[in-house]
Image: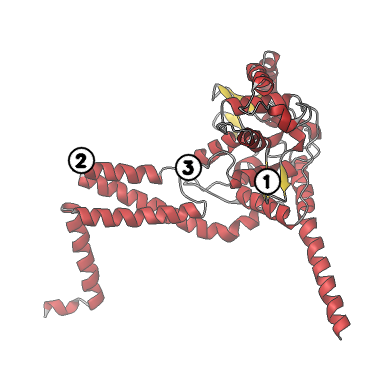
Amino acid sequence: MKKLAFLITGLTVALYGTILFAEPEAEQAAFKSYFHNKFPDVDKPDFINGVYALDSNAREQWMEIEEFPPYEIAIDEGEALFNNTRFTDGKSYGHCFGTRQHLRKKYPYFDNEKAQVVTMELAINDCREKHGAKPLEYKIGDLAKISAYLSYHSRGDVIDVIVSGPAAIQAYNKGKEYYYTKRGQLNFACVDCHVSSAGKRLRTEILSPSLGHVSHFPVYRLKWGSIGTLHRRFSGCNSQVRAKSQPGQSEDYRNLEFFLSYMSNDLEFNGPGVRR
Amino acid sequence: MTISIFSTSKLSIFGLCVFALNATANPTNPDFNALWLEVDSFRKAAGIQGHEWRDTAKILLGAKEEFKVGNSEKAFVLLSKARAESIASLAQAAREKKSWKRRVIK
């Protein structure tokens, strides 16, 4: 009898574990398939170009801007910041990250020791604090420039976020909940604009699909007149639906980045980008 | 005899209305401050659940400023607006606890 109870318990735990771990994979497949079916004419790898994958006129204008991209200055400044900064202990960013190449694809990841999602921007500031420097502002300025430089040297790398283990799945689920939850006075969720209304017009702009959203950040937005991080954009979205926005690298935003990045797995990084 | 047409509850509502009108017409600091603190606690409760709206805090601050300079009528209008926002944001938070799940792409 004891053996039977033990066997049933074991099977239940195994089954629950399988369901728990299988969910993100199944959800990712459903997410991708939704966009592939909704936009059958868009080549799958082209989703990294957001709205420019959907609209030929907008694409033409964007490609013209890309001839002399306004983010180039940010890349150069980011390079100088990354290579020339010496912290008070004599160390540099290189001591934390090693090479500049292929860094973007390591992030975001779930750090089991810290029990939190670590993004590239968080890691940059962690490096600074570890070596006695003040953290940089998360949404704009020098941090966005360093991020632009590192992203540029990760172009062509593939998004490969791993969601494994109960704590990582919990962070994924929190990000998912944030994505699908309506907020603000306008009562909008991310999904309302970037899934069900993706491809439709909102005033003069076409709403971009969520698939591939994270690939091209940081971006130089013509509206901003400067380069900004993904969390600056999250914050702007919150504000547009009249919800209180959160600080850059808040737990909610990091979990959201984790979820969205996982949804875009197998697509290429192509940041920094330029957007209207 | 005429008073018998009012039930106890009707009298209570009548009393509350008179109180509210008095408070608006001739508000005192304790009235305003107590109401302000109550609305601010609604705002904070919504914020803890990640559902504070963008402008509620600004409206509340505006109400305080107006009251400070003696524009009590405008102060109560703003306070009432902030109250409506914070109550609606709390309702949104309660509603979304479950309803977000229906939107997940499966």
Q: Residue at x 16, y 80 (%)?
A: B4
User: In the rendered structure, are the residues bearing label 3 and label 2 in contact, judged by CB atoms less than 8 Å apart?
Assistant: no
Given the current orientation, which residue lies at the most extreme bottom position? A1
Q: Residues within 10 Å of mark 3 (few under 14, many from 20)?
A: many
In the rendering, which numbered label is found on residue A117? Answer: 1
- Residue A258 visible in rendering: yes
Given the current orientation, which residue lies at the most extreme front position? A89
The quarter of the picture where residue A69 lies is top right
What whole-number distance in Å separates the C-alpha atoms at marks 2 and 1? 47 Å
Q: Amino acid at mark 1?
A: Val
Q: Residue at x 20, y 56 (%)?
A: B23
Nearest the viewer among A142 and A184 is A142
What whole-number distance in Å separates the C-alpha atoms at marks 3 and 2? 28 Å
- The residue indicated by pointer 3 is A242
Given the current orientation, which residue lies at the most extreme left position? B1
For the C terminus of chain A, the image quarter is top right
User: In the rendered structure, are the residues bearing label 1 and label 3 in contact, judged by CB atoms less than 8 Å apart?
Assistant: no
Q: Amino acid at mark 3?
A: Arg
